[in-house]
Amino acid sequence: MNRELIAVIDEIGRQKGIDKARVIGAIESALQTAAKKRFGQAENIQVEIDSKTGEISVVSKKIIVDTVANPKAEISLKEAREYDEGAEVGDEIGSLIEMDELGRIAAQTAKQVIFQKVREAEWEAVQKEYSTRQGDLVNGIILGMERRNFLVDLGKTEAILPIQEQIPRETYRRGDRVKALLLEVRRTPKDVQVILSRSHPQFVAKLFELEVPEVGEKIVEIKSIVREPGDRTKIAVSSRDKAVDPVGACVGIKGSRVQAVVRELRGEKIDIITWTQDPRVFIAEALNPATIEKVGIDEEKKSALVVVADSQLSLAIGKNGQNVRLAARLTGWKIDIISATEYEKEKAERDRDIKAALAEETEAQRQQDEARAAAQQAE
């Protein structure tokens, strides 16, 4: 059994890359616990395994004293000198303990420890490899569903595509191939979880990086991206090369590049706009596909009033306010939208109010002048 134990440890070490000393140390610790259960926790018991022969020795260590008060931890000088003639008070002496069942316990323990160490080593390997790939795209195969979360085979490990990271209304069957963003590698007491996402905005950014060479080469930069998964994404891009049109590069010839991304997103709409430092222009572009007539801004409050033609109002706002909501998130500005008719009406009301105020001010000034003139005549 002893040599078989070492042979198993050596084989596991070669296959899984687990340090031999680490496994032996764990088995020794487990056997020490078993021995203490057999002889009592108060016993100072140590277990050692010879790494070459697999020989297991169980030693009970005691302190040499003149008068024994605790037999489990102390031994008299007279008794100690029966084992070692040179023993002195205060020394520590060890005696071998015979455990007939140690071989059976060792076999069971070795299996448990090796299994646990293999799992731990595999977890560490997964964590080490996939932690460096966080934020990258990965390809996998759907294994099934558990509590509405998809299980995905990545080859070396299984990953989870949680319900909250899925694109709404998107379904998969066992065996389907799936592309996703490697969102997070999470270590738990029981395992290592690799979390995927298809709903994160960076998933779209990575798809553009894959489909658009200029984005992958950093010639075109994605400055901002916002998304409501399954419905619409807005992406602001700029170019580091004046000869390269950032929007045109992302769209591709006849829309080939953006359509490849749209297909991966199952038809999700994508608005690509040119990023600019001019907030008026940026806000107008962000409200694409609507055509904007005027943009007024309050830089202190970082708010904007946008005027659109009556026919463009619903398009600018979007279904359930989605278009203006995404534009506000993309630009970082609070955006209010009104129609041209409403704007003209409010403008007319403001003009009337201003005229009325001016008329009142003129009348008040006239009355003051008359009163002053009357006072001067009276003098």
Image (cartoon, rainbow, N blue to C red):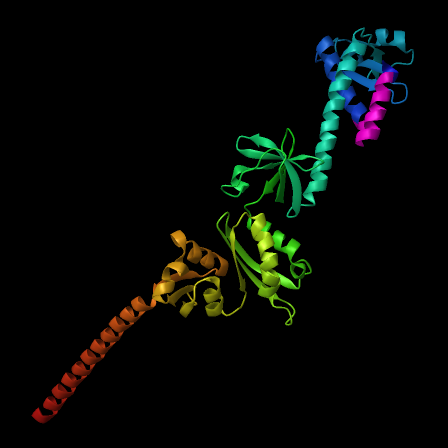
The residue lying at 82 percent from left, 29 percent from top is 15
In the rendered picture of this protein, how many numbered marks are placed on residues?
Answer: 0
The residue lying at 41 percent from left, 65 percent from top is 304
Q: Which residues are magenta?
A: 4-22
Front residue of 164/140: it is: 140
Q: Is residue 70 visible?
A: no
Q: Residue furthest right?
A: 85
The residue lying at 86 percent from left, 17 percent from top is 4
Residue 240 in the image: state x and y as whole percent.
64, 67
- The dominant secondary structure in magenta is helix
Assign the N terminus to one quadrant of the image: top right
Q: Quadrant of residue 237?
A: bottom right
Q: Residue furthest front?
A: 254
Front residue of 214/304: it is: 214
The residue lying at 19 percent from left, 80 percent from top is 359
Looking at the image, residue 11 sits to the left or right of residue 118; the answer is right
Q: Give above or below for 123 relative to 32.
A: below
Q: Give above or below for 135 relative to 219.
A: above
Q: Quadrant of residue 121?
A: top right
Q: Residue furthest left?
A: 378
**Magenta stretch encompasses residue 6:** yes
Q: Give above or below for 375 relative to 81.
A: below
Front residue of 331/27: it is: 331
Assign the C terminus to one quadrant of the image: bottom left
Residue 339 in the image: state x and y as whole percent.
34, 65
Residue 346 in the image: state x and y as whole percent.
28, 69
Residue 353 in the image: state x and y as whole percent.
23, 73
